[in-house]
Image (cartoon, grey):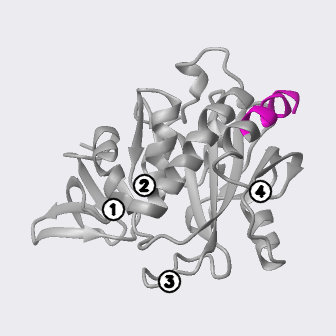
Amino acid sequence: MSDLLAHAEAIWEAVVPSTPGFTVEVLRSIDSTNSELMRRSRDGLMEPLLLVAEEQTAGRGRLGRNWHSRPGQSLTFSLALPMAPLSWSGLSLAVGVSLANSLHPEVRLKWPNDLWLHERKLGGILVETAGSGAMPSSATLQPRLVVVGVGINIARPLSSSVASSPDSASTLTAMEPAGLAEVLIGIDAGEVLERLVPPLVNDLQAFAVSGFAVFGERFAQRDALRNRLVRLSDGTEGTACGVDAAGALLVLTAQGMRHINSSEVSVRPC
């Protein structure tokens, strides 16, 4: 945990000028950083907070899948930030853009919430809001606590751990997952955390003002699915054609262009 603690103060110093009240907590072990911040939200938490854990024993990915982290092998954290954007559409994509830009030029984004490195899963993102855990309607202008959970493999995980990743049911994650140390040799979790958090806070604040529009071009540059054959969870197949202005996946099918707002997507084997 020492490498995480060593970077916590630098993160706080970088973030607090633009985010008054911001705090950083580093824990040795917890069930889930997202779950903990959601519990605190029910007790009235509305202050910006970064919660980092060396180990998660019951981490959660998208659609309720498990994400287990091992000390020193991965980075798991959740960032709570009160937000009141005009539209919430595309928030998870904006988070992905921010993380990918901070990590490495070779990191790509698989819609809607996966980080890829060399065609393999590097990490995942889970965005929740206080209360229901669902994104509020675009008409909701009152600030809500947004909890952004991030899990990133630092060392390449053991093949046997693939089943514990957030999207293990998809065809893609049957492949051996990736680790950031493959392209950034010797990097540790604390260094990655310091790379990610200050730009992520800035990008979330930019999203609150301008929505997904300011991230669209950056997403396109990192889009791992564009022009690839994909299969949706309902069995529909087509060609991924990027995303629309609201962050919905565009898929050209035999029946025409579809805008996908919520669905599992897997690349069809060719």
Residue closer to the observer: 231 or 104: 104
Label 4: element kind:
loop
User: Label 4 sits on what residue type?
Assistant: Gly
Asked whether the residues under the numbered discs 1 and 2 touch, taking CB atoms below 8 Å apart as contact, a structural biologist would say: yes
Label drawn at residue 140: 3
Instruction: Give, as a single range, the part of the protein colored magenta.
Output: 1-11
Residue highlighted by disc 2: 93
Q: Residue furthest top?
A: 185
Label disc, if present, on residue 247 of the rendered structure: 1
Q: Secondary structure at mark 1?
A: loop
Task: Please indicate whether residue 118 sits to the left or right of residue 11 in the image.
Answer: left
Q: Amino acid at mark 2?
A: Leu
Quadrant, the N terminus:
top right
* Mark 3 Cα shell of 10 Å, populated few (<14), some (14-19), many (≥20): some
Chief SS of the magenta region: helix
Determine whether the residue tagged by mark 2 lies in a helix, strand or loop.
Answer: helix
Which one is nearer the viewer's eye here, 176 or 46? Answer: 46
Q: Is residue 49 visible?
A: yes
Residue under the point 68% across and 45% down: 17
Q: Is residue 246 left or right of residue 194?
A: left
Residue 77 image offset from top left, x and y in percent: 71, 48
Q: Secondary structure at mark 3?
A: loop
Contact? badges 1 and 3 (CB < 8 Å): no
The CA distance from mark 2 to mark 4 is 26 Å
> For residue 200: magenta?
no
Residue positioned 31% across, 65% down in the render: 248
